[in-house]
């Protein structure tokens, strides 16, 4: 069992003075810097939670502080970046922008209204909720809420019901963003460290979306008197 600096340990592979019978290299935690890391982490959470500074700046500053105070080295920091997540974020932003700028999302919404014309407000509300819940896993919840709220108001007026009913549908459906990695920021954050794949999110998130959709479809029409 040998302990030493990273470069020295790697050098053992080509050394003529040492015969390696088994190769298994692990980094030993530097526990005497644990308090520094804990203090930096707590500061980031506190600053972001209180709204003192934006969470993006707090997180970036925390990462820089971890490097500056020796909690991690540059190799560990760069190794924690997952190229799949970076590419996925860029692809999701491009897809969301395309659907918004080309009117693709509005086209789907108005197609839904046309296809379900005469089906009644309850059926329209249920179908609209499902559409928004599916789109939020592609566009992100914020973009979906901004994009579909005016559409919800327009649909409600066409049906002659209170627009807030469909706005509530947008609020709840836009937060069903857990069936894809790009649906929400935290999904992407845990994808790399948890070694998750795209199908893992679909397998865990899709049934939950169905449960929420069915629950809303049964409760909302009764509560708002749409039956």
Image (spheres, rainbow, N blue to C red):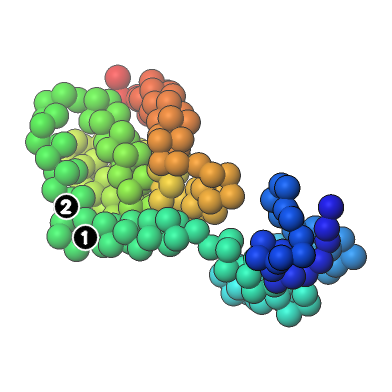
The answer to whether 74 is drawn above or below residue 138 in the figure is below
Q: Are marks 1 and 2 in contact (CB under 8 Å)?
A: yes
Residue positioned 50% across, 59% down in the render: 82
- x, y (%) of residue 96? 28, 57
Residue ID at (87%, 61%): 31
Which residue appears farthest toward the bottom when viewing the image? Answer: 68
The Cα–Cα distance between marks 1 and 2, rounded to whole angstroms, is 8 Å
Q: Secondary structure at mark 1?
A: helix
Of residue 81 and residue 173, the one placed in the foreground of this image is 81
What residue sits 19% from the left and 25% below the top? Answer: 120
Q: Residue at x 76, y 60 (%)?
A: 18
Task: Sort mark 2 into few (<14), some (14-19) or many (20+) by Cα contacts within 10 Å.
Answer: few
| Residue located beneath label 2 in the image | 104
Q: Residue 130, position in %: x, y?
A: 31, 33
| Residue 4 on image: x %, y % | 81, 66
Regarding residue 143, the answer to whether it shows in the image is: no
Residue placed under numbered mark 1 in the picture: 98
Q: Image quadrant for the C terminus?
A: top left
């Amino acid at each position: 069992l040998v302990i030493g600096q990273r470069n020295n340990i790697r050098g053992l592979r080509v050394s003529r003075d040492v015969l390696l019978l088994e190769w298994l290299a692990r980094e030993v935690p530097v526990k005497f810097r644990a308090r520094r890391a804990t203090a930096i982490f707590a500061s980031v959470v506190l600053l972001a939670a209180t709204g003192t500074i934006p969470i993006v700046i707090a997180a970036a500053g925390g990462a820089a502080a971890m490097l500056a105070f020796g909690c991690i080295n540059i190799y560990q920091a760069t190794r924690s970046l997952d190229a799949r997540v970076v590419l996925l974020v860029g692809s999701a932003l491009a897809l969301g922008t395309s659907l918004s700028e080309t009117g693709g999302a509005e086209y789907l919404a108005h197609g839904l209204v046309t296809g379900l014309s005469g089906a009644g407000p309850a059926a329209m509300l249920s179908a609209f909720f499902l559409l928004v819940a599916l789109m939020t896993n592609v566009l992100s919840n914020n973009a979906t809420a901004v994009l579909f709220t005016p559409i919800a108001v327009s649909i409600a007026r066409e049906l002659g019901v209170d627009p807030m009913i469909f706005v509530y549908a947008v609020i709840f459906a836009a937060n069903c963003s857990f069936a894809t990695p790009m649906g929400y920021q935290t999904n992407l954050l845990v994808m790399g460290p948890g070694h998750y794949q795209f199908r893992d999110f679909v397998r865990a998130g899709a049934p939950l979306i169905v449960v929420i959709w069915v629950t809303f479809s049964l409760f909302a029409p009764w509560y708002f008197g749409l039956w």
